[in-house]
Image (cartoon, coloured by chain):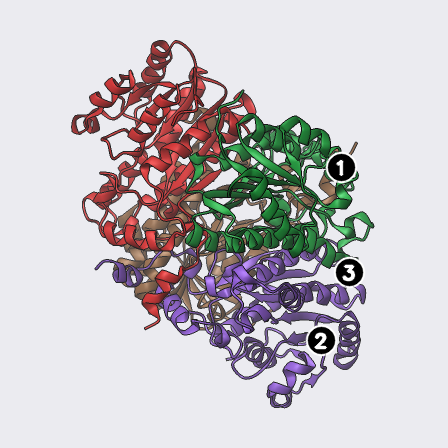
Chain colours: A green, B red, C brown, D purple
Amino acid sequence: MSYNLLKGKRGIIFGALDENSIAWKTAERVHEEGGSFVLTNAPIAMRMGQINELAKKTGSQIIPADATSEEDLALLVEKATEILGGKLDFVLHSIGMSVNVRKGRPYTDEKYDFTVKGWDVSALSFHKVMQALYKAGAMNEWGSIVALTYMAAQRTFPDYNDMADNKAYLESVARSFGYFFGKEKNVRVNTISQSPTPTTAGQGVKGFDGFINYAEKMSPLGNATAQDCAGYTITLFSDLTKKVTMQNLFHDGGFSNTGVSQEVIEYFNK
Amino acid sequence: MSYNLLKGKRGIIFGALDENSIAWKTAERVHEEGGSFVLTNAPIAMRMGQINELAKKTGSQIIPADATSEEDLALLVEKATEILGGKLDFVLHSIGMSVNVRKGRPYTDEKYDFTVKGWDVSALSFHKVMQALYKAGAMNEWGSIVALTYMAAQRTFPDYNDMADNKAYLESVARSFGYFFGKEKNVRVNTISQSPTPTTAGQGVKGFDGFINYAEKMSPLGNATAQDCAGYTITLFSDLTKKVTMQNLFHDGGFSNTGVSQEVIEYFNK
Amino acid sequence: MSYNLLKGKRGIIFGALDENSIAWKTAERVHEEGGSFVLTNAPIAMRMGQINELAKKTGSQIIPADATSEEDLALLVEKATEILGGKLDFVLHSIGMSVNVRKGRPYTDEKYDFTVKGWDVSALSFHKVMQALYKAGAMNEWGSIVALTYMAAQRTFPDYNDMADNKAYLESVARSFGYFFGKEKNVRVNTISQSPTPTTAGQGVKGFDGFINYAEKMSPLGNATAQDCAGYTITLFSDLTKKVTMQNLFHDGGFSNTGVSQEVIEYFNK
Amino acid sequence: MSYNLLKGKRGIIFGALDENSIAWKTAERVHEEGGSFVLTNAPIAMRMGQINELAKKTGSQIIPADATSEEDLALLVEKATEILGGKLDFVLHSIGMSVNVRKGRPYTDEKYDFTVKGWDVSALSFHKVMQALYKAGAMNEWGSIVALTYMAAQRTFPDYNDMADNKAYLESVARSFGYFFGKEKNVRVNTISQSPTPTTAGQGVKGFDGFINYAEKMSPLGNATAQDCAGYTITLFSDLTKKVTMQNLFHDGGFSNTGVSQEVIEYFNK
């Protein structure tokens, strides 16, 4: 089902790795809604993905860029506006990675080189992306910037490790930059706090299956899928949400405001 | 601009008083998007409004109902599904009134008969509406229920008086009923926390002009208008937000997450 | 262990039912810390309790009062200041009851007479208490008013029923009245959001044992007990927290900011 | 006034720069309450301060340590337990600095080397401190760790710049580490979100005078002072708050939950 919600709109989508990615589903959905975009990912991440297939399917070009590099980002923004033929209306930031998690370091035994790297990739990169867009004057008025996040920024999920702190930083960047982008350019910035999602990245987290099972039982509407998230993101890119900014929006079937569900409490009644 | 976002969807819209009302703008917008609905308001409120004009314009019928009366609501739900030819997909609750405010009673000198009345009309009515819908089995799966609220539920705005407490109750009802409506019927329930809006009702609040001026200066994107709110509500009624539930969603140009703006702080620099 | 934290301070304690009550433990603790107070409870609730024993032990007088009655409250405030020999420094509101819960009405089938009664007793009573104190000018500067609440005000716990909405209203009243009491009288008003506690009242809630077991496993420090709560309340009555106001303070061993614990997730890993 | 609240307790206090520092006032207050401690600060910061005077007054020793250095922290923890004669009961982290702010770089033109440095000093240092304590097994059961933060972590204050993002990270670290420290060691971790305070550090922020004036007018009880904060911190170090953990506690005279005050709105009524 398409509504032409993004007809004529241009953007950049970060982080489409493979067909399980939220960014991948969003790219497909944006295309259906009439938007055009450039796909980007870190050179190293792209070797692992099937991003060419997505580019073909959506008539998009791919511009590799390391989201921690100011130079790469400046070039990306310049090329994207050139390719798309004008300033941008939407940007999706869907980037996250913890070296501590990958290397199996517990939260109470972080290796700080790993911590710095994960923070740079997962959190500071969002500031870098926006600063590149801001300095280049690359966003159209009433454009929309969205980053994906997770509720660990508010409450502790032990296996989520230092990604919790990275997401807290990311959400703060959305507010802080959203203030200036709003005031000076009428651009909105928000984060979507998504249900745990079985993406290729998500599945790497220890105990992920148990957790997704728990979240499903806790959420009155069940977990939101990557496809659901793509739909929600579309509304935030559309002209219907022009005055929503600096918000962290839970997209999680009600998990965030459920203290406990009947199904979960039954495990503890015996 | 129409996207056919609500094609074939049916609903009830409470609270369209006159063309300044958010509910009025929403009704117009729903109509543009292909939705059909019944308009309702308290018999006493309707005499003051121009609701017939809106009904004509949108091809809707009007069913007067006192939202504090279980009988009226049961009848409304029954008639609405009959008139619209099926179960409902969306409901807007836009009802609020404080007798203490109207009679000029300060928050520290409430008359409790007034308090009870205002709470019943502004807050408990939302429970009554949902209970009527729930008992009648009148909502379609993945239907969407929205109530309008204000940030006074989180932070004190002295002139907002007991409406703050009513809105806190209303938002809690959204979460509580949203849990059961989600779990058992796959229906979502949310509140939109809207910028101060110069509706006929809003303008009655003491010091409203100063306040709206302040909010405009505090909000990076400026205050959200009634028309903006109608657009946002459309997204929550659409199929693109199926997994958003039990949320209070700020629609306020960024006011809620702005500690202070540069424009406001200048008043205090001298 | 006593610190003389409340030496010379006077107050009123609502809601001591029996030795399991948080108010009972608080009364004992206040007495140890050198504070003097009047005990009060609804005439009907007092017949069930052993409040005389507590009065004797703490050298206190008992003044029965229905906390929904303006007359009773006015009289209580007058007598309390008379008995204690001066204005008040602290007040504890520990009152809550849902008729819907007692009568086994589910949240989706509330009887609204019950709802109104429960709201009046559990939520509006806090406003009534403060309005009585305010009008009588009965609080000393830098006095402290505390009400007990529960996290169901923020997130849904299905068996908590309409008490969730009552607690949301109560917490809003704390903020709203806290604003005026702060601005005009330098009095602070806060709520403590306490772990589920096996009081005589709490134990009446359906599925309470399973829930308290779940909460224990979710809280990194375990559930806070009634005795713990008494200690925390003492700090809020003391001169060490003079600038804390309009806050809802979680006292729950970390439950509120734990997304899931390792112990809980293990149930879902199989 | 002293209550002997911390009799026999041992700790470390970071960040006492001069007599305007919150850490300085807290050290004095802890001493009055019977606690003993080691003072520490960055070697470079200590040259600017009068910390020797404080050490003398409170009978404390000074151990210089760079809070971004794992080696320095390990040594500090070792020496502190040695000097104090046992494990620790309390730790205060009062450290923050933004190079971007110092060098006058606006938020939309961050120099990322500065950003990394400020984040390391202001935010990651809190993790490093706790990891050093955790690994050394240096905290007693029911010990208490407190860090100072600011509400910019939740809402944007434009001049606060990247310190907002640092404080968001710091508060997340409190929750994340609080989970593990609670679960495994029964140690609590909290942050105090303090009113803007005219410390030597705070006064360096652009527009600070206007802002503190604004905050004073917005807060029903007025801004909390450094002295007030010392008192509040004492309660969190005491045995009366054993079950409070993973919380961010606003200590601000009500600012955080005031939407607008009558005094502020008057500026906008004209």
As drawn, the label of residue A113 is 3
Vertical relation: B22 (above or below) C3: above
Disc 3 and disc 1 on one polypeptide chain: yes
User: Which image quarter: residue A38?
Assistant: top right
Vertical relation: D192 (above or below) C114: below
Name the residue nearer the viewer: D2 or C267. C267
Name the residue nearer the viewer: C214 or B212. B212
Vertical relation: C115 (above or below) A103: above
Task: Select label 3 or label 1 by which is in front.
Answer: 3
Residue C33 seen in the current view: yes
Q: Cα distance, mark 2 to mark 3? A: 17 Å
Amino acid type at mark 3:
Asp
Left or right of A211, for residue D78: right
User: Which image quarter: residue C133?
Assistant: bottom left
Amino acid type at mark 1:
Gln
Give the labeled residue for mark 1. A203
